[in-house]
Image (cartoon, rainbow, N blue to C red):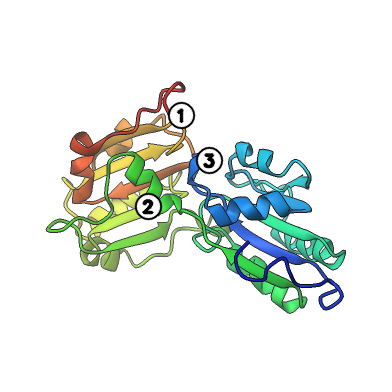
Amino acid sequence: MHGNDYTESNNKHPSGVVYLVGGGPGDPGLLTLRGLDCLKRADVVVHDRLSNDELLAYAPQAEQIDVGKLPDHHPIPQTQINALLVEKARAGKTVVRLKGGDPFVFGRGGEEAQALAEAGIRFKIVPGVTSAIAVPAYAGIPVTQRGMARSVAFITGHSADSEPLDLNWQALAQGVDTLVFLMGVKSLPVIIASLMEAGRPTGTPVAVIERGTSPRQKVIVGTLSDIQEKAMEIQPPSIIVVGEVVSLHDTLKWFDPAPASK
């Protein structure tokens, strides 16, 4: 590990430590070296649904606990996950909380860090490659491009308790070049209608990318006017990209999602 992460004596710190580790967007090769080192040293790995199962092979020595959530179905509430992290750390364990993407990009890592801080538990953040940039990249879509897109916004496409999306649609439609919506498949009709009502041209290119960076990646490209019809069979987890940069997909697509590809 870097620094003195594992040289501190448990006599000085009777409790363990929790590493909030970003596992990347799906391709196991996008795990960071620091994240890999944490997994190899973990006593406990608490992992979610979007972290690639292949990553768990790096921690055969660890107790592995699945706390994954499905859309609109959370069998283990967030409060219980927080309590589990505290419990394991207080038992003196080195805990890896393995999360898909980056812990602090719509990953509830901030909430978990707050719970650990309130409980007096040591924690460290290990950033991960967020799907917000990696999934478009694997589809040949740069989220910024000189002369085309000088700004990008990452936006949740899902509200807690199925409430309507409460977003500043005017600012998003007219003030940001590239919009990247995470967890937005079910909200696609609302996203499209809201952006057009707020003034985004109907001909704006849109891509919907299912299971990006994985062998099952699927990319559907259209415009605000027709993407809903084209993407009817797309399932979560998927990302929606809105902006002129989507027009680069045909030229820059490079990733072969066939299972045999490397």
Q: Secondary structure at mark 1?
A: loop
Where residue 49 appears, as percent x and y from the top left, is 62, 43
Mark 2 or mark 3: which is in front? 3
Circle 2: residue type: Ile
Query: Would residue 62 be found to the left or right of residue 54 on screen?
Result: right
Occupied quadrant, residue 250: top left
* Mark 1 crowd level (few <14, some 14–19, many ≥20, 10 Å Cα): some
Residue assigned mark 3: 28
Query: Would residue 128 be found to the left or right of residue 229 on screen?
Result: right
Circle 3: residue type: Pro
Dot 2 or dot 3: first in sequence order is 3
Quadrant for the C terminus, please: top left
Query: Would residue 76 be found to the left or right of residue 163 on screen?
Result: right
Q: Is residue 14 above or below residue 209?
A: below
Circle 1: residue type: Pro
Q: How many marks?
A: 3
Spatial separation of the CA atoms under disc 1 and disc 3: 11 Å
Mark linked to residue 133: 2
Query: Would residue 115 be found to the left or right of residue 255 on screen?
Result: right
Where residue 233 appears, as percent x and y from the top left, is 41, 29
Spatial separation of the CA atoms under disc 2 and disc 3: 16 Å
Residue assigned mark 1: 215
Dot 1 or dot 2: first in sequence order is 2
At a point 44% along the width and 59% down the height, the residue shown is 165
From this viewpoint, is residue 174 visible? Answer: yes
Spatial separation of the CA atoms under disc 1 and disc 2: 18 Å
Where residue 41 appears, as percent x and y from the top left, is 72, 53
Occupied quadrant, residue 51: top right
Q: Secondary structure at mark 2?
A: helix
Q: Using the image as rendered, state which of residue 19 and residue 242 is in the foreground.
A: 19
Q: Using the image as rendered, state which of residue 64 and residue 71 is in the foreground.
A: 64
Q: Is residue 142 above or below residue 81?
A: above
